[in-house]
Image (spheres, rainbow, N blue to C red):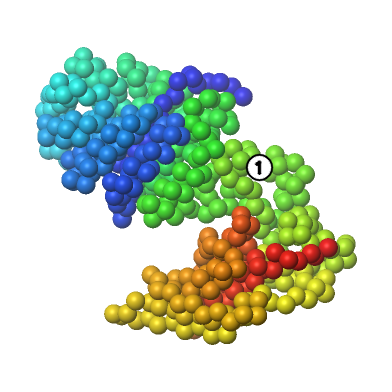
Amino acid sequence: MIALLGDKIRFFDTTLRDGEQTPGVSLSPDEKLTIATLLSDIGVTVIEAGSAAASVGEREAIKLIADAGLSAECCTYVRAMKLDIDYAADAGADSIHLVIPVSDLHIEKKMRKTRAEVSDMAFKAVEYAKERGLIVELSGEDASRADQQFLLEIFREGVNRGADRLCVCDTVGLLTPERTREIIPPLNIAPLSIHCHNDLGLALANSLEALKAGATCAHVTVNGIGERSGNTPLEELVMALKVLYGTDTGVTTEKLYHLSNVVSRLTGVPLPMHKAIIGEMAFTHESGIHAHGVLREPSTYETYSPELIGRKRRFLLGKHSGAAAVEAALSDLDYSPNREQLNEILLRIKVMGDMGKRVTDADLMAITDAVMLIEREPELVLKQFTVVSGNNVIPTASVTLLVRGEEITSASTGDGPVDAAMEALRKTVSDVADITLLEYHVDAISGGTDALVDVTVTLEKDGKQMTSRGARTDIITASVEAMITGMNRLLGEEHEDRS
Ligand code: MN
């Protein structure tokens, strides 16, 4: 490992500003404070909390974050306007991200101004912000397409007028690592940040290159959310620096996955399945060879240990599975089949996989029970369920189950008919067990409205997780089936010995 990078790399997180500019994303002040607190705790240096001029709510959020006593610096985006700077200072921000268009394209076509006019606005804004006691990060918008001599002049005079830090924005993601290496060194006249966009998938590479070329701070967002294809992902940059360059970033990596999930939940932007670091598949193994390798020595097929970012590895069973992974999964479920039984279980798993089905825990248990000739009384039997839904009614469900022989009926309302049914089911068993629904996933197997709907749920009881499925043409029935199958298995865990 080569330590090419200085030991003082700072992270300027713009999840709450550039990230929030993701079309369709809007965070309340309280949600922003939740995210800012996590960002500060994890070790981010600067939090760009929003755009002070955007709205009243935005200023309220900046004030909340500025007053929260976080160790991170509270920054806000401003244009070169007195009004914006006043909003920032009045909201109590520590610093401003003062953004000035610097490419001729932006100066002429967007601003309809001249270089001289824009420079003048920038310098006046720097001076006024200093008067108002703000730390100033002077940022060149579209800097990667600007005349680099002009950019250097603006930066130099900006620093003369009081700017504390500078920032190069690759606003539309056109930098290459080679070009980055060229343009950064001459601009190192004050602490320099790099702000990259991921339009060609190069944000991480360009950010690393800028840091190697002398920049000391990278602008990032959690999960890489942001305008268009987003910004440099915090988690990718932190982990690349740690794993590949041996840099101590000061970020508590064990909290990264939790942070990703909170941001995903609050912004409503799902984590892409194959996304580096945080995607569902990043530490999931199915193929026999890989699972076997990882079980013997994790580094055979894992770049670093999932615990390092607060995750766990997972094995999925399917047609690529081998005996080692199936044996490991069965041992987790307290089964100990003999060699012959294991081969038969593996064969049946592969048949399910060939039919295009994901093999859930409940499927694996049902297969194993059949192969090992284990009979068990169901813990739950569905007697009836009714769901009322439509316009002008609150979706309501009632469910009657035989719970260990005793008939119990519960009712619940919900956000929709499925939600109401799930909640009614949970209530029905709540006297015997506290079961929570962690994940709910639907696939339609064929195209039309008569399609078979395949519902997979992940349930949890006392830290034990269980996946199960239901497949019907009716989504509510499929959901109820998946829930009851999973709940049956979780309740059965309590008093069974399968050896
Ligand atoms: Mn941006």
The C terminus - image quarter: bottom right
Identity of the residue drawn at 16% across and 24% down: 132
Ligand 1 lies under 8 Å from the Cβ of mark 1: no
Q: Amino acid at mark 1?
A: Glu
The N terminus - image quarter: top right
**256 and 10: which is toward the camera:** 256
Q: Is residue 469 above or below residue 335?
A: below
Q: Is residue 379 above or below residue 343?
A: below
Task: Let me know if residue 438 appears in the view.
Answer: yes
324 displayed left or right of 59: right
**406 and 417: which is toward the camera:** 406
Identity of the residue drawn at 21% across and 41% down: 59
- Return the residue at label 1: 302
Instruction: Point out residue 195 in the picture as x, y percentages from the top left corner.
Output: 35, 33
Instruction: Point out residue 386 in the picture as x, y percentages from the top left corner.
Output: 47, 84
Task: Let me know if residue 322 appears in the view.
Answer: no
Disc 1 secondary structure class: loop
Identity of the residue drawn at 40% across and 22% down: 216
**86 and 219: which is toward the camera:** 86
Instruction: Point out residue 236 in the picture as x, y percentages from the top left corner.
Output: 49, 38
Instruction: Point out residue 139 in the picture as x, y percentages from the top left corner.
Output: 27, 29
305 displayed left or right of 210: right
The picture quadrant where one finds residue 484 is bottom right
For label 1, the crowd category at 10 Å Cα-Cα, with few meaning under 14, some 14 to 19 and many 20 or more, is some
Q: How many marks?
A: 1
Identity of the residue drawn at 31% across and 55% down: 24
334 displayed left or right of 397: right
Q: Is residue 159 above or below residue 61?
A: above
